[in-house]
């Protein structure tokens, strides 16, 4: 299964959107915070990213979530997933793949942005990059889920144009409801 797509080569200055730089340019983007400037490097994930991601997930989510992100996602879906790094290490990640059983569907399992990079459009750009790659691979829609308590994730997905459904009772087993998200992909995505 492949959903590798092009390297995500982007440059972003705060408030000025994202500029594609082409595949040969090193994948970097610059984000200006109030007190500093960070250069972000976006790259295809690798299996050995698992440790760094697992180490921050609970902290970034503010609750225990790492059990929902076992190593298999990096071992088997790293080619379609992305990691963003800055001078301080891991800045964001996207775990996503084309459904092996429903090839017209792209599925985003986890997206996480380090708290000091939130609100700069980083997750949006990771999603939009995945939308483009999924569309190229023949997907017609993208799906995701989140816990009903994750108001930030629900607002984020609404903002990205997802239809929100739920809480769906017992979605992940007895007593484990989930919100489900679905978004059609179009050539204008
Ligand atoms: C949810 C999360 C990924 C958003 O990342 P981000 O880089 O800050 O999001 P962006 O800056 O790209 O925001 C894109 C849009 O979503 C909205 N949004 C993002 N987080 C939001 C929040 N907590 N509440 C309300 N709206 C939010 C933004 O306002 C923006 O909308 P706009 O473009 O219409 O103004 C980030 O807060 C995070 O890592 N949270 C913890 C992990 C998590 O819950 N992941 C999602 C479930 S897998």
Image (cartoon, rainbow, N blue to C red):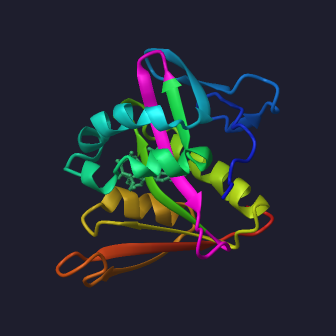
Whether residue 34 appears in magenta in the rendering, the answer is no
Tell me where residue 141 appears, x and y as whole percent: 64, 72
Q: Is residue 119 above or below residue 124?
A: above
- Does the rendering let one see residue 121? no
Measuring from the top left, give residue 56's x and y in whole percent.
30, 35
Q: Quick check: 158 above or below 40? A: below
Give the x, y percent position of residue 114: 38, 34
Q: Nearer the viewer, residue 101 or 138?
A: 101
* Residue 96 lies in quadrant: bottom right
Q: Position of residue 81 (x, y in %)?
A: 56, 46
- Is residue 130 shown above or below 157? above
In the image: residue 100, left or right of residue 120: right
Which quadrant does the N terminus fall into? bottom right
Name the residue: 30% across, 42% down: 57
Answer left or right for 41 relative to 149.
Answer: right
Closer to the camera in the image, 67 or 154: 67
- 87 falls in the magenta region: yes
Label the magenta part by its dominant secondary structure. strand
Q: Nearer the viewer, residue 116 or 87?
A: 87
The residue drawn where x is 68% and y is 54% is: 3
Region in magenta: 86-105
- Please say whether residue 38 is visible from this viewpoint: yes
Q: Quadrant of the C terminus?
A: bottom right
Residue positioned most to the left: 175
């Amino acid at each position: 299964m492949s959903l590798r797509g092009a390297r995500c080569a982007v440059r972003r200055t705060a408030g000025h959107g994202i500029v594609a730089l082409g595949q040969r340019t090193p994948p970097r983007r610059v984000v200006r915070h109030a007190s500093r400037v960070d250069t972000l490097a976006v790259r295809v994930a690798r299996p050995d990213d698992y440790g760094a991601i697992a180490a921050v997930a609970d902290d970034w989510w503010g609750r225990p979530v790492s059990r929902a992100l076992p190593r298999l996602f990096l071992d088997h879906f790293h080619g379609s997933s992305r990691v963003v790094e800055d001078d301080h290490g891991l800045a964001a990640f996207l775990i996503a793949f084309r459904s092996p059983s429903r090839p017209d569907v792209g599925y985003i399992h986890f997206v996480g942005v380090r708290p000091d990079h939130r609100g700069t459009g980083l997750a949006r750009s990771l999603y939009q990059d995945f939308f483009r790659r999924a569309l190229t691979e023949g997907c017609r829609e993208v799906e995701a889920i989140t816990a009903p308590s994750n108001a930030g994730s629900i607002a984020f997905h609404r903002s990205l144009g997802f239809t929100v459904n739920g809480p769906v009772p017992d979605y992940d087993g007895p007593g484990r409801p989930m919100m489900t998200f679905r978004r059609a992909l179009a050539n204008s995505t």
